[in-house]
């Protein structure tokens, strides 16, 4: 290899380095997707009714009716152990649930995962809210709430009246969630 080739490679590498730096400088963080589902005139949303008709196993393998959560504001978090943003947000979501203690709202997690993975994960992180095993059926349930892509994490904020107040696709921004909970 002669000096001309080395100089050309160095020039190309420098050009790519400069382009990479420019992209990094101008990169903007994309906020998580949120939406409000259209009001239904005071009637619970169909997706909420379908959620409360579900009976899912808890981490001990016992079937639990999700209707037990009807009538109080509810944060429903669809997640999986293999989903990095899910894993990142769960300790803070657990702390939020623990701090409120179910006084003004409840938090539940619906896992799109296997019971063994969920059990191991929950034991390691000491999650302070109920987790339910939905497997891949949880993806379809989240789609009913507007998660057409089936992305995770997906969180739904449901008012005490059964109205979907907001949905969040992606890692939660907790000051936004706290502000939304305060409006309920």
Image (cartoon, helix red, strand yellow):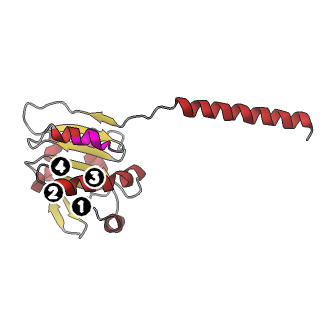
Marks 4, 3: nearer the viewer: 3
The local crowd at label 3, few if under 14, some if 14 to 19, many if 20 or more residues have their Cα within 10 Å, is many
Tell me which label, 1 or 4, sits earlier in the chain: 4
Which of disc 4 and disc 2 is earlier in sequence? 4
Q: Residue 167 in magenta?
A: no
Please tell me how crowded label 2 is: few (under 14), some (14-19), or many (20+) other residues with Cα within 10 Å. some
- Give the crowd class for mark 4: few <14, some 14-19, many >=20 residues within 10 Å: many
Using the rendered image of the protein, determine whether residue 136 is visible from the camera's viewpoint: no
Q: Which mark is residue 51?
A: 4
Of marks 4 and 3, which one's residue comes earlier in the chain? 4
- Magenta span: helix, strand or loop, mainly? helix
Question: What are the residue bounds of the magenta stretch?
Answer: 172-178
What percent of the width, then of the height, locates residue 175? 28, 41
Residue 168 in picture, x, y percent from top left: 29, 40
Q: Earlier in the sequence, mark 2 or mark 1?
A: 2
**Residue in front for this viewpoint, 3 or 130:** 3
* Residue bearing mark 3: 93
Quadrant of the image occupied by residue 173: top left
Quadrant position of the N terminus in the picture: top right
Mark 3 and mark 4 in contact (Cβ < 8 Å)?
no
Callout 2–callout 1 Cβ contact below 8 Å: no
Marks 3 & 2, CB-CB < 8 Å contact: no
Depth order, front residue of 170/104? 104
Of labels 3 and 1, earlier in sequence is 3
In three-dimensional space, the C-alpha distance between marks 2 and 4, rounded to whole angstroms, equals 22 Å
Q: Which of the pair 50/109 is nearer the observer?
A: 109
- Residue that mark 2 sits on: 101
Name which residue lies at 32% across and 68% down: 123
Which is nearer the eye, 26 or 155? 26
- Helix, strand, or loop for circle 1? loop
Question: SS at mark 3?
Answer: helix
Q: CA distance from mark 3 to mark 1?
A: 9 Å
């Amino acid at each position: 290899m002669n000096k001309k080739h080395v100089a050309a490679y160095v020039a190309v590498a420098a050009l790519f380095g400069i382009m990479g730096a420019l992209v990094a400088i101008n990169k903007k963080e994309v906020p998580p997707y949120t939406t409000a589902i259209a009001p239904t005139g005071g009637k619970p949303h169909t997706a909420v009714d379908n959620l409360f008709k579900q009976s899912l196993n808890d981490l001990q393998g016992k079937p639990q009716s999700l209707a037990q959560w009807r009538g109080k504001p509810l944060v429903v978090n669809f997640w999986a152990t293999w989903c990095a943003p899910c894993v990142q947000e769960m300790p803070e979501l657990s702390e939020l649930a623990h701090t409120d203690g179910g006084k003004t709202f409840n938090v539940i997690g619906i896992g799109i995962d296997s019971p063994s993975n969920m059990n191991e994960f929950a034991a390691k992180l000491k999650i302070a809210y109920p987790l339910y095993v939905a497997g891949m059926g949880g993806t379809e349930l989240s789609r009913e709430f507007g998660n057409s892509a089936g992305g995770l994490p997906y969180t739904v904020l449901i008012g005490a009246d059964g109205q979907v107040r907001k949905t969040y696709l992606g890692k939660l921004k907790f000051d936004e969630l706290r502000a939304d909970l305060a409006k309920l």
